[in-house]
Amino acid sequence: MGKRVQGGKARELRPFRVLAAPFVVARPSGCRIRTRLHVSPADAVVLRAVGEHLGALAGADLAARMRIGNVPAAHARRAERKKALTPQSSSRWAGAITRTSEDQYQLGRRALNARIGSLRRAIRAIEARLAVPPGSCVRWGRRMVRGYVNHAERRAKQQRPQILKRNLRQAVRERDSGRVRVTRGGRLLLNSRHHLYDTMTGPKPLTEAAWQAELDSWGDEWSARRMFLTADGEAGAPFGNYTISVAPTCGSIALVLPEPLRRQHANARRGRYVLDAAAVFTHRGEQWSDRVGAGAPVRYDITYDSGRRRWYRDASWSTVKKGRQAPVPTLDVLRARPVLAVDVNADHLAAWILDPCGNPVGAPRTLPLELAGLPATTRDARLREAISRLIHLAQVHDCAALVVENLNFADARTTGREKLGRGRRGKAFRRMVAGIPTAKFRDRLAGMAHHAGLSVIAVDPAYSSKWGAQHWLAPLKEQASTGQTTVTGHHAAAVVVGRRGLGCTARRRKDGPRQTPTTSASRRVEAGAVRPEDRAGPAVPETPSHRTLGRTERTAPARTTCSTTPVVRQTRARPPGKHPPHGPTTVRGPSVPDQQLALFGMSDRPTPAD
């Protein structure tokens, strides 16, 4: 099958692209939990002093790592940098700082490579359209390239590739030199510092007192975002971490102070400070206490939210061994039970329960997911709420997995306006595509479903909406006409997604008998024309029944793969509208003795005319 592409005088059938095979999403390889710390004023002073001191060391080490450039890990001089940081902190604090610097540098390298690829794709897309005269369409290979609407738009677009090429040359120079751009605390925070007056929220012009208050508030946020309070876990250490240790029984926290701060703030032996606050993990606390009690490594991060004026403590650990992946069930095991098919959209989730045969069960579900224009924390909370409702729905219906589309809008977002329309409609469509939480939804769903005992199957999203509307929307609307839920094209797409996860075809089988009277096995046996695949063995087919006595009309020839079978004439009633016009036709089938035909008055020899 294929779809027709218009453009030019000729029409060409373009085949559908090959769909990728469904797969089970890998389970998360780690776990991270958070709790709030109700610290005292003395604890807040110590934590802030330690965080700012280590943050300054982390910034200096990151700058040193940038100067080294893109070299193999063995030549990054991490041991030298760690040795230089140890006198100002400790050996374990220095190890965590150098490890974090290396991670940030490698992340910046990956971001720079992604930016270079994005710029090159955008340049190719614009130059391809500039090569086509305005208002026309040219075929390049098997695809159509459409020019810009008019000359004015084309002249404006001629400046865009020059800007993109300049940015590309600069990015390539940075990559070749080993330089990356990394801002501790975030680039948005740095831009706010460079344009501090413009980012102030109070009424302008600001008075001296208001300006000083804004400066103090911004300085508090600047220092809070750039503090460093991260301690890596160690196997065999007391409670899984020697630098920041938490007792599982009472939750007391002991912190190893850097060398310059021990004389001033230490309140325990060996240069430690014991906080007045206690760490109590309510969410998955049993797993954390079991791991801490066994001495397994646990990493701790202490952060400060300047807007809420709250301290938080995160605990994270790995659930699988290094270099391995978490085991996942096979598709055959998951397809033996019902699944919950989900179609992800910009403002809602469309879901439907499918049985193991691929049939929709029950009523469709629509879960609202409004994320546009909301803060990051609010978006994350709403996304978690929607995923929790999906998991609860799957558990109620005894589903083994959730089937989602393996969406990836990275290429579409990089090409921008050149691939996603123009004008107001194009802008609205690009905004909608950017608002769909594809990667975050899949990652959140995989982690939360794993903890709930469910799996996630990812399928190819190609043609799901088109084939859902073509094969499933009308019958689903007819089936749910008496219900209160309105069936939309997104629900039909969810059905197609679920059927792909179950290994079924997207096309819906038509109603009615699966075989026509002319091809049914019973009529072929009755006529004596039996195909090789219909035979149960070498036995001779059954003799014609007495119902063939009054039949004088002749049937169309039946198919067979045996060329040595003798030809006999068969007669039976012709259903109206099912066969070609009357005429002398023959059927290939096993020969029947003349004695049997004579028994029923059916001689195979021609009779003379009256």
Image (cartoon, helix red, strand yellow):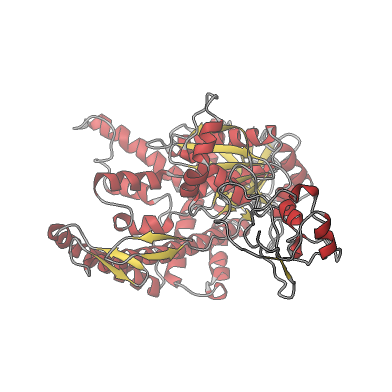
Q: Residue at x 50, y 39 (%)?
A: 473
Q: Is residue 593 above or below residue 208?
A: below
Q: Is residue 407 above or below residue 169?
A: above
Instruction: Please say whether residue 263 is visible from this viewpoint.
Output: no
Residue 322 on image: x %, y %: 69, 61
Quadrant housing the C terminus:
bottom right
The residue nearer to you, when weighing 495 against 601, is: 601
Q: Could you tell whether 69 is left or right of 303 in the image?
A: left
Q: Could you tell whether 129 is left or right of 530 in the image?
A: left
The residue nearer to you, when weighing 295 against 456, is: 456
The residue nearer to you, when weighing 218 against 517, is: 517
Q: In this figure, what is the number of numbered marks? A: 0
Residue 335 on image: x %, y %: 70, 49
Q: Residue at x 52, y 63 (%)?
A: 18
Q: Could you tell whether 190 is left or right of 48 in the image?
A: left
Query: Which residue in the rendered view is the most extreme toward the left?
Result: 152
The residue nearer to you, when weighing 86 against 559, is: 559
| Rendered image quadrant of residue 33 | top right
Q: Residue at x 42, y 70 (%)?
A: 67
Residue 484 on image: x %, y %: 52, 23
Q: Is residue 17 above or below residue 373?
A: below
Q: Residue at x 72, y 52 (%)?
A: 523
Q: Could you tell whether 192 is left or right of 267 in the image?
A: left
Q: Is residue 453 above or below residue 173?
A: above
Instruction: Please say whether residue 417 is visible from this viewpoint.
Output: yes
Residue 564 on image: x %, y %: 74, 75
